[in-house]
């Protein structure tokens, strides 16, 4: 199975050169914020393993909030403005970076020349590697589904629709569905498109089974090694310690939730100018990008809790949500959470289907607890109760927070324009139906309806 990976290059921008760099990045676009796949700087279309990529200037317009809430001790006057180049790809990110360094060297050198410490004579790949930032957590909608597979299955559906139109030019199918399907199979075998065989998803299934088996073994091991009575005493001791630790944690958590200064006021609303800048970049495709950047509350507790929460998300999401949805949200292609500045600030970046408002509504209505888990320790996040309640449930406060922290992305690339996740899933079902050996008339009728 070809697993997906991601990359992110982040480097501070030379003071005074931000406007020049922004203009250069905008020159890569065919629409506001939407990259020309064949632009001269980084021709994304030539790299057939990239799903999504973006260049974005990480300028935190809320950086003064820290001093406002926590006084001079909380000030962050030297907060750098970063250039970030990030993307999601098939196979190892290292292989893609090497390919980018070889085939888009001139353009990348020109872009990175605006960054502090970039040496025009330096080895480009080594420089990118030295400025690579790993995510604290990452999400992939369907692990193992490649750019090639998505494009081939979209081509297959188009070909089948054309064949079907010839078989039923008036739109009325007069033959039995099974016979139509057999004829479509014959036509595809004769004239294509011919599909690359899919790789097994067994490694992912084995990982899930292995985790469940290991968890079960841990639970029963004391009963295998000790007497039944001793095993019960062992578990009683373990649960007592865990209970005391949980109680202490909840007490400390609640103390912070009721006394941290930034919780005394609700999040500020964004300016109309900021909203207009974001709106100009939206809805040029069925998929949109989202980039948010902000600060973590000062103090060891907030940072360690955020690290632990993101570790849990990163560990659990491929086991619990390996195909098609993150909890009940089914519109996200890829997402990641990244720490910068020694975990003082954090970036969230995603690619999602639908409008900006529907994306936010999905989170508020379906997984507000997950938002609170991931972001409750962000500076000026709406008040939470015991980590997962409140917070994003306060819809207007949440939307004010996220809009104010959302950044305009200078240039963004998508490898399969016009295809939503529902389109991609439908195309995969069409392929599966085509490759099945047997299908009833009812199933064949349902399969044809997908076309």
Image (cartoon, rainbow, N blue to C red):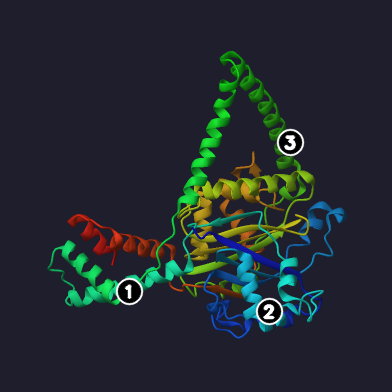
**Which residue is denoted by mark 3 in the rendering?**
252
Residue 391 in view in this figure: no
107 vs 178, left or right, is: right
What residue is shown at x 55% (from left), y 69% (from top)?
A: 52
Dot 3, crowdedness within 10 Å: few (<14), some or many (≥20)? few
Dot 2, crowdedness within 10 Å: few (<14), some or many (≥20)? some
Instruction: Choose between 255 and 39: the one closer to the eye.
Output: 39
Q: Position of residue 246 (x, y in %)?
A: 67, 31
Question: Gap between marks 2 and 1, in whole Å?
Answer: 36 Å
Q: Position of residue 375 (x, y in %)?
A: 65, 51
Between discs 1 and 3, the one toward the N terminus: 1
- Indicate the quadrant where residue 425 lies: bottom left
- Give SS at disc 3: helix
CB atoms of marks 3 and 2 within 8 Å:
no
CB atoms of marks 1 and 3 within 8 Å:
no
Residue 68 in view in this figure: yes
48 vs 123, left or right, is: left
Between discs 3 and 2, the one toward the N terminus: 2
* Dot in front, 3 or 2: 2
Question: Gap between marks 3 and 2, in whole Å?
Answer: 47 Å
> Split into 4 quadrants, where in the image is the C terminus?
bottom left
- Indicate the quadrant where residue 42 lies: bottom right
Dot 1, crowdedness within 10 Å: few (<14), some or many (≥20)? some
**Which residue is denoted by mark 2 in the rendering?**
108
- Give SS at disc 1: helix
**Which residue is denoted by mark 1 in the rendering?**
158
- Give SS at disc 2: helix
Name, please, the residue furthest toward the top: 229
Q: Position of residue 142 (x, y in %)?
A: 47, 57
* Dot in front, 1 or 3: 1
What residue is shown at x 76% (from left), y 59% (from top)?
A: 65
Between discs 2 and 1, the one toward the N terminus: 2
């Amino acid at each position: 199975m070809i697993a997906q990976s991601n990359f992110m290059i982040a480097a501070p921008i030379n003071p005074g050169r931000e406007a020049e760099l922004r203009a250069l990045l905008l020159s890569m676009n065919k629409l506001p914020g939407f990259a020309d796949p064949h632009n001269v700087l980084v021709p994304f279309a030539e790299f057939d393993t990239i799903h999504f990529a973006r260049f974005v200037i990480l300028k935190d317009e809320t950086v003064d909030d820290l001093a406002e809430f926590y006084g001079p001790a909380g000030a962050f006057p030297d907060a750098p403005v970063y250039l970030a180049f990030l993307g999601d790809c098939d196979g190892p990110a290292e292989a893609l970076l090497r390919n980018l360094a070889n085939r888009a060297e001139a353009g990348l050198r020109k872009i990175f020349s605006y960054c502090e410490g970039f040496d025009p004579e330096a080895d480009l790949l080594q420089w990118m590697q030295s400025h690579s930032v790993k995510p604290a957590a990452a999400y992939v909608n369907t692990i193992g589904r490649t750019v090639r597979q998505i494009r081939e299955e979209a081509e297959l559906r188009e070909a089948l629709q054309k064949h079907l139109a010839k078989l039923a030019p008036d739109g009325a199918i007069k033959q039995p569905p099974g016979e139509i399907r057999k004829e479509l199979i014959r036509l595809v075998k004769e004239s294509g498109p011919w599909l690359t065989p899919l790789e097994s998803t067994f490694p992912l299934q084995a990982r899930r089974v292995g985790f469940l088996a290991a968890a079960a073994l841990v639970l029963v091991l004391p009963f295998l090694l000790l007497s039944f009575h001793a095993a019960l005493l062992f578990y009683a001791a373990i649960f007592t310690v865990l209970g005391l630790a949980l109680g202490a944690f909840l007490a400390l958590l609640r103390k912070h939730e009721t006394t941290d200064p930034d919780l005394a006021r609700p999040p500020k609303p964004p300016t109309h100018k900021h909203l207009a800048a974001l709106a100009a970049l939206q809805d040029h495709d069925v998929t949109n990008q989202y980039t948010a950047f902000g600060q973590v509350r000062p103090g060891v507790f907030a940072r360690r809790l955020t690290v632990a929460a993101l570790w849990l998300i990163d560990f659990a999401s491929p086991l619990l949500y390996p195909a098609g949805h993150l909890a009940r949200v089914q519109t996200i292609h890829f997402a990641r959470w990244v720490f910068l500045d020694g975990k003082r600030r954090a970036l969230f970046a995603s690619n999602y289907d639908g409008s900006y408002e529907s994306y936010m509504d999905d989170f508020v209505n379906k997984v507000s607890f997950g938002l609170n888990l991931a972001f409750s320790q962000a500076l000026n996040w709406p008040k939470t109760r015991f980590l997962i309640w409140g917070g994003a449930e306060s819809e207007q406060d949440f939307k004010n927070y996220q809009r104010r922290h959302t950044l305009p992305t200078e240039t963004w690339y998508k490898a399969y324009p016009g295809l939503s996740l529902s389109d991609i899933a439908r195309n995969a079902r069409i392929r599966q139906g085509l490759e099945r050996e047997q299908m009833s008339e009812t199933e064949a009728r349902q399969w044809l309806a997908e076309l």
